[in-house]
Amino acid sequence: QLLLAFILVLLANLLLVLNPLILRQGLLVLMSQDLEEESFLTSILRSFLGSSAHSAYSWGALLLAIASLAALFKYYMRTIFITLGRQVEMTMREKVFQRIQSQSRAFFDRHEIGDLLSRLTNDITAYRDLLGPGLMYPAFVITLVTPALLALFSLSAWMALMSLLPIITIYLFNLLIHY
């Protein structure tokens, strides 16, 4: 299930990165700009759209279909990650409960019940959050940033470097402040 969730987030993010590239190609085709050389993406899109490649409605429908498919992938990815986190939480609760039941009376004399319940609730919730959103968000960022930067570098290296400048500047500024 975890592998399926990673595949879904990767596909959703690749579609999200593909959408602006398709919009660019659609605008170029619709403006009837003579492209010196037709890109691989343009040739695929022209073959997919066929005779309606010069219709704005076709390009709009294609963009909407891609965005909808990406949203569907994201929805199922989130469902899988959250379900996995809940399943692990329930398994941990059952194991902890069995372990607590096997403790001696002296254990309960040393530790207050309210304190034990509070600690267990907080720790198990943190564990669930680590396995659910804690894995989902880094996977989402990694699978979005890497293809987006590759796409941006393929369009314009100068623009890609300029977009990285604020990120690097903020990181260096943060290091300067903290150290």
Image (tube, rainbow, N blue to C red):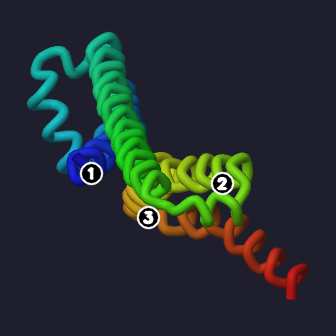
Residue under pointer 2: 116
Mark earlier in primary sequence (1, 3): 1
Q: Is residue 83 left or right of residue 51?
A: right
User: In the image, is residue 121 above or below residue 26?
Assistant: below
* Residue 104 picture location, percent across and down: 52, 62
Q: In this view, does 40 lie to the left or right of 36?
A: left
Estimate how packed mark 1 is, as few (under 14), some (14 to 19) or many (20 or more) residues with alpha carbons within 10 Å: some
Residue 84 visible in image: yes
Marks 1/3: CA distance?
A: 30 Å
Looking at the image, the residue that sits furthest to the bottom is: 179
Q: Which of marks 2 and 1 is nearer the N terminus?
A: 1
Compare residues 127 and 19 and report the one nearer the observer.
127
Residue under the image location 41 percent in, 62 percent down: 146
In front here: 46 or 140? 140
Q: Determine whether the residue tagged by mark 2 lies in a helix, strand or loop.
A: helix
Q: Decide: few, some or many residues near mark 3? Use Cα within 10 Å; few <14, some 14-19, many ≥20.
A: some
Name which residue type carries label 3. Phe
